[in-house]
Image: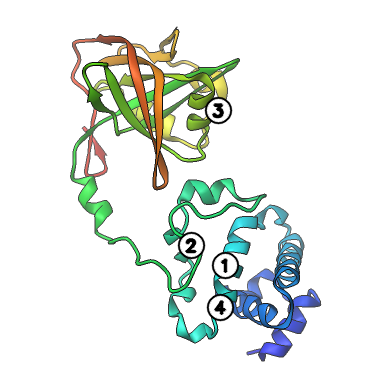
Amino acid sequence: MKSDDNLLAAFEAGEIDSGEFPHERHLRVAWELSRRYERDEAFERLAAGLRDIAARAGRPDAYHETITRAWFELVAAAEDLDRYPELRDKRLLNRYYSAARLAAGRTEWLEPDLHQLCLPPPPAAPLFLPRVLRRIPTAVAILGTRAVHTVHATTVSSVTSVSRDPALVSVCVASGSRALELVLDARAFTLSILASDQEALAVHFADRDRPAGADQFASIPHHSSPFGPVIDNSTAWIGCNLHAVHPAGDHRIVIGEVELAGEGDRPPLVRHDGVYH
């Protein structure tokens, strides 16, 4: 085990490989740097060392600006690392950032969207909550939108009626997502409520590796509307103009004013306890 002095010297000399730099060593180096240099210089030395480790490992894209700085800010605020055992939890940033916010901050620094970066950390969300929410059956829909020459769609399961007069519906869309970006650009979107035999479409439009743009609709029966693409043979469909957007944790509540609505005669697809029915 390297002493703190030797560890820091090896880090700054570029003598540590990624396999020799687990999370606890990362914490120790960040803390030592914060004690020996002015704050900005300490962070720059940490960032430079981590970029070097990633580059020598053949993974230069592994460096993440927001994750690096957020950990540095937390560690630098600790008078004694042993006083905050939560820092040893590599998932700690999830208490400060939504997943979408972190994903968007790879190349630039982004402030947290869930909680201010400070110690002690905020309490973790109850681990049982996701299991509870899985027990609530939900309809499954494809949100579609078209902005300029770009078309996009994604699977959602949070469609809710908000108002009858005016006719408003809501859907939750991940912050920083491509879907949200295009809905904000287009100021309109569609919701195709899937039928019970369209499970494959729900899986397809939830797949992060699916093709982009119009290619994601290849071989999928659909048609265009003034508000975006509509999946054919769905059990119901809605076209909306964007009415409002409200921040809510790691998602945005998107509210649409309904301008188009139709229904079929097929039973809907439902997701319950992680399974489609």
Crowding at dot 1, Cα within 10 Å, few <14 / some 14-19 / many 20+, comes out as: many
For badge 3, the amino acid type reads Pro
Estimate the spatial distance between the alpha carbons at disc 3 and disc 2, rounded to whole Å.
30 Å
The residue that disc 3 covers is 211
Crowding at dot 4, Cα within 10 Å, few <14 / some 14-19 / many 20+, comes out as: few
Colour logic: rainbow
Between tags 3 and 4, which lies in front? 4
The percent position of residue 201, horizontal first and vertical second, equals: 37, 25
- Quadrant of residue 253 in the image? top left
Position above or below: 18 against 229? below
Q: Residue at x 44, y 59 (%)?
A: 115
Q: Are marks 1 and 2 in contact (CB under 8 Å)?
A: yes
Label 1 element class? helix
- Quadrant of residue 147 in the image? top right
Estimate the spatial distance between the alpha carbons at disc 4 and disc 2, rounded to whole Å.
15 Å
Estimate the spatial distance between the alpha carbons at disc 1 and disc 4, rounded to whole Å.
12 Å
First of labels 3, 4 by sequence position: 4
Estimate the spatial distance between the alpha carbons at disc 3 and disc 4, rounded to whole Å.
39 Å
How many marks are shown on the rendered structure? 4
Label 2 element class? helix
Crowding at dot 3, Cα within 10 Å, few <14 / some 14-19 / many 20+, comes out as: some
Label 4 element class? helix
For badge 4, the amino acid type reads Glu
Q: Residue furthest front?
A: 165
The residue that disc 1 covers is 71
The percent position of residue 144, horizontal first and vertical second, equals: 43, 21
Visible residue check, residue 234: no
Q: Residue at x 67, y 82 (%)?
A: 35
Between tags 3 and 1, which lies in front? 1
Q: Which mark is residue 93?
A: 2
